Image (spheres, grey):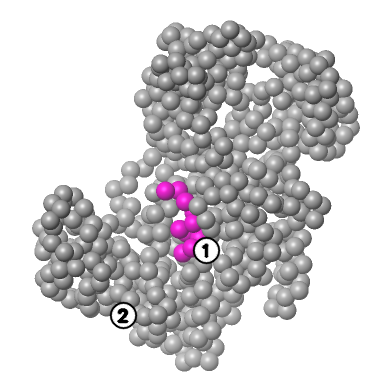
């Protein structure tokens, strides 16, 4: 695989440069494929070798590259050495490239790319990922979709790299909205509606009581009183709250199953209502808690009285706030999991909130605060179903399935499927995830149903179609060809381009592991699918001699394997027929 070739190149470079091979591995990168010309397989950026050299009068980079290339020799691995713009380029022996890459893909299976030299020496970490986190007693809002699929991707990637990952769903199951909901249910709630359609009914009650509270101070007062009863542990109030919570989680679990997402722990703000009082005592004992004239308690994060740096941690009636509960949750998780990293996946609107939480942990004396990380994302705009504005994720999932079934029914090449509904949902989810992951996570983007469902171009439908088509090839021609193959039969430009691209998979995984952005993997898989489409049209299997057919099937199987690996990391279930 790439790392074996990298190590071989690094060994030769280390003798010439008198540097340890380990220092050179990450400076040797696979060359992106070009449609215009055949390119070398690896390149060394001479600039990266001189990064630590502060001498501004260093010789011209191009001359450096040429001098270095002259000192290097071709061997059994490297068949050609050349120079580019500040680079030394290496072409790998073609037959060795073919044999090594294809064998490695088949042998490593789902671990292909993850066993790379780029990840060697990577310490195994305990990682907590908090994501999704919908508000209990409200239907699963589409705004939580991004947190759910991004958090799932990050957890998948970390797990694939061998880390011990804990997936936490931190539910919004406490706070003033439960005062409103409790008071609202006593006014407008129906037990039979709650049992038959819990989240829909609670949502309706919540909307109605909000309107009433805005006009009627008595409703607002009774909502406040209900939340105080909750905070004081009133048995009746807590029983009603528990019913709302249990019914909500049942509904969420059903939706997560459709998304292919699971959690190790369903936590929530309610877990920390008592521990948040301990946090307030701790802040007070450290002299950090300040009372305001209104009776609220604040912490000055600037240390010099800057009013913009004041963070409110307690209401005037002594009840806790979201930030206080987040502090209590972080401290509790450190005690429970002793994490090396904790990642919060929420929209970018919460950036300041998490800066304050991490800063407060720091001034409270928790030196592990720098292990906490916020991964922010932008807003999806314009997501509507045929029934109008979307509020609920389930409506989106149903719409995806319906539209995909209609699309599949209108295509003549669609095969008879055992479970068309399930296939339609998997293909539709792939479409949704790829549209979401193509750009930077921080970017807002305009949602487009038409773009989501295009079967051509850079879409999730195209990835699923490519996977299904390659799987069909294997089904048609069987697997007897997998024992051995003739590397000389895979020297056409289309084959070489695919092999070169397969070489780069570890680098793409490495980039995503560094910045937690899925777009590197998405773009890689889309390019792989386009290369496979070209090869499928030109490198025929059916009409070729057995030796050639076997070699080509081997190549196509390797493409399908890497495509499936990448899709699964992104949270997509590859389909075998469509």
> What is the x, y in percent for residue 574?
58, 63
**Numbered-mark total:** 2
Q: Nearer the viewer, residue 216 or 11?
A: 216
The quarter of the rendered structure image containing the C terminus is bottom right
- In the depicted structure, whether residue 195 falls above or below residue 96: above
- In the depicted structure, whether residue 347 falls above or below residue 435: above
Task: Indicate the quadrant where residue 324 lies.
Answer: top right
Give neighbour class at mark 1: few <14, some 14-19, many 20+ (Cα, 10 Å): many
- In the depicted structure, whether residue 94 falls above or below residue 558: below
Note whether residue 253 is visible: yes
Q: Earlier in the sequence, mark 2 or mark 1?
A: 2
Is disc 2 placed on a helix, strand or loop?
Answer: helix
Q: Which mark is residue 95?
A: 2
> What is the x, y in percent for residue 281?
50, 10
Q: Which residues are magenta?
A: 515-524
> What is the x, y in percent for residue 363?
40, 20
Residue occupied by mark 1: 564
Q: Residue 417 lies in magenta, yes or no?
A: no
Q: Residue at x 79, y 30 (%)?
A: 206
Note whether residue 335 is visible: no
Is 126 on the left or on the right of 144, as rendered?
Answer: left
Q: CA distance from mark 2 to mark 1?
A: 26 Å
Is disc 1 placed on a helix, strand or loop?
Answer: helix
Q: Residue at x 61, y 72 (%)?
A: 456
Give the prevailing secondary structure in the magenta stretch: helix
């Amino acid at each position: 695989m790439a790392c074996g070739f990298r190590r071989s190149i690094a060994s030769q470079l280390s003798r010439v440069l008198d540097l340890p091979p380990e220092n050179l591995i990450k400076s040797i990168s696979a060359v992106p494929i070009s449609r215009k010309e055949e390119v070398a397989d690896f390149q060394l950026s001479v600039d990266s070798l001189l990064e630590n050299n502060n001498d501004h009068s260093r010789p011209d980079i191009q001359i450096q590259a040429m001098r270095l290339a002259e000192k290097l020799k071709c061997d059994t691995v490297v068949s050609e050495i050349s120079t580019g713009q500040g680079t030394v380029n290496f072409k790998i022996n073609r037959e060795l490239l073919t044999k090594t890459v294809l064998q490695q893909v088949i042998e490593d299976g789902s671990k292909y790319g993850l066993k790379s030299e780029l990840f060697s020496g990577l310490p195994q970490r305990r990682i907590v990922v908090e994501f999704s986190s919908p508000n209990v007693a409200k239907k699963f809002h589409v705004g939580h979709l991004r947190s759910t699929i991004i958090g799932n991707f990050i957890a998948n990637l970390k797990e694939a790299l061998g880390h011990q990952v804990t997936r936490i769903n931190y539910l919004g199951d406490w706070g003033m909205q439960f005062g409103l909901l409790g008071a609202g249910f006593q006014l407008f709630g129906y037990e039979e509606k709650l049992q038959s359609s819990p989240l829909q009914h609670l949502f309706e009650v919540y909307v109605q009581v909000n309107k009433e509270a805005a006009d009627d101070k008595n409703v607002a007062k009774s909502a406040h009183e209900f939340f105080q009863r909750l905070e004081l542990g009133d048995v009746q109030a807590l029983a009603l709250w528990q019913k709302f919570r249990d019914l909500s989680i049942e509904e969420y679990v059903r939706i997560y199953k459709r998304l292919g997402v699971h959690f190790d722990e369903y936590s929530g703000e309610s877990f920390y209502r008592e521990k948040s009082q301990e946090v307030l005592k701790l802040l007070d004992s450290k002299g950090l808690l300040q009372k305001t004239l209104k009776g609220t308690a604040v912490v000055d994060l600037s240390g010099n009285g800057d009013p913009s740096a004041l963070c409110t941690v307690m209401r005037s009636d002594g009840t806790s706030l979201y930030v206080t509960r987040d502090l209590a949750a972080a401290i509790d998780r450190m005690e429970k999991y002793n994490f090396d990293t904790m990642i919060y996946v929420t929209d970018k609107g919460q950036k300041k909130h998490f800066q304050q939480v991490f800063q407060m942990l720091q001034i409270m004396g928790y030196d592990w605060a720098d292990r906490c990380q916020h991964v922010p994302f932008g807003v999806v705009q314009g997501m509507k179903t045929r029934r109008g504005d979307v509020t609920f994720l389930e409506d989106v999932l149903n719409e995806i399935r319906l539209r995909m079934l209609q699309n599949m029914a209108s295509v003549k090449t669609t095969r008879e499927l055992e479970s068309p509904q399930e296939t339609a949902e998997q293909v539709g989810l792939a479409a949704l995830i790829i549209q979401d992951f193509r750009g930077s996570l921080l970017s807002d983007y305009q949602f487009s149903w038409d773009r989501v469902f295009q079967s051509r171009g850079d879409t999730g439908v195209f990835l699923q179609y490519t996977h299904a088509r390659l799987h069909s090839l294997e089904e048609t021609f069987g697997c007897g060809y997998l024992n051995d193959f003739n590397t000389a039969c895979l020297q056409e430009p289309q084959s070489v381009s695919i092999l070169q691209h397969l070489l780069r998979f570890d680098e793409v995984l490495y980039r995503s592991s560094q910045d937690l952005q899925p777009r590197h993997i998405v773009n890689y898989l889309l390019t792989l699918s386009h290369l496979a489409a070209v090869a499928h049209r030109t490198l025929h299997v059916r009409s070729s001699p057995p030796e050639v057919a076997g070699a080509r099937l081997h190549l196509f199987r390797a493409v399908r394997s890497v495509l499936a690996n990448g899709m699964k990391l992104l949270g997509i279930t590859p389909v075998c027929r469509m």
